[in-house]
Amino acid sequence: MAIHKVFISYHHDYDQKYNEALIEFGKRYSIFVDRSVDTGDIPDIWTDGIYSPPISRDFHFA
């Protein structure tokens, strides 16, 4: 089975429980690999533009 790259954005204050459930579901059924960024993964000296380019607002579905 092919695994596709997907970016999921969520609000930490309101959606953290859903994020944790999704990660657990992915681990249990091996349907995706969690590659979330954790605290400390990005050096404090980096500016926003260094880590990633701006997110495109153009969505293309096949």
Image: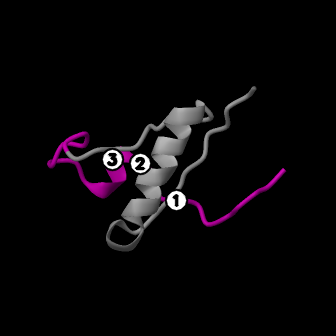
Disc sitting over residue 50 in the figure: 3
Residue that carries the numbered disc 1 in the rendered image: 55
Q: In which quarter of the image is residue 12?
A: bottom left
Q: Residue furthest top?
A: 1
Residue at (45, 64) in percent of width and height: 10
- The amino acid marked with disc number 2 is Ser
Distance in Å between CA atoms under marks 2 and 3: 6 Å
Residue at (62, 34) in percent of width and height: 31
Distance in Å between CA atoms under marks 1 and 3: 13 Å
- The amino acid marked with disc number 3 is Ile
Residue that carries the numbered disc 2 in the rendered image: 52
Looking at the rendered structure, the secondary structure element under dot 2 is: loop
Which span of residues is magenta-colored?
40-62
At which x and y percent is residue 3? 67, 32
Q: Is-magenta flag for residue 9? A: no
Q: In the rendered picture of this protein, how many numbered marks are placed on residues? A: 3
At which x and y percent is residue 22? 51, 50
Looking at the rendered structure, the secondary structure element under dot 1 is: loop
Q: Is-magenta flag for residue 56? A: yes
**Residue situated in front as seen by the camera: 21 or 32:** 21
- The amino acid marked with disc number 1 is Ile
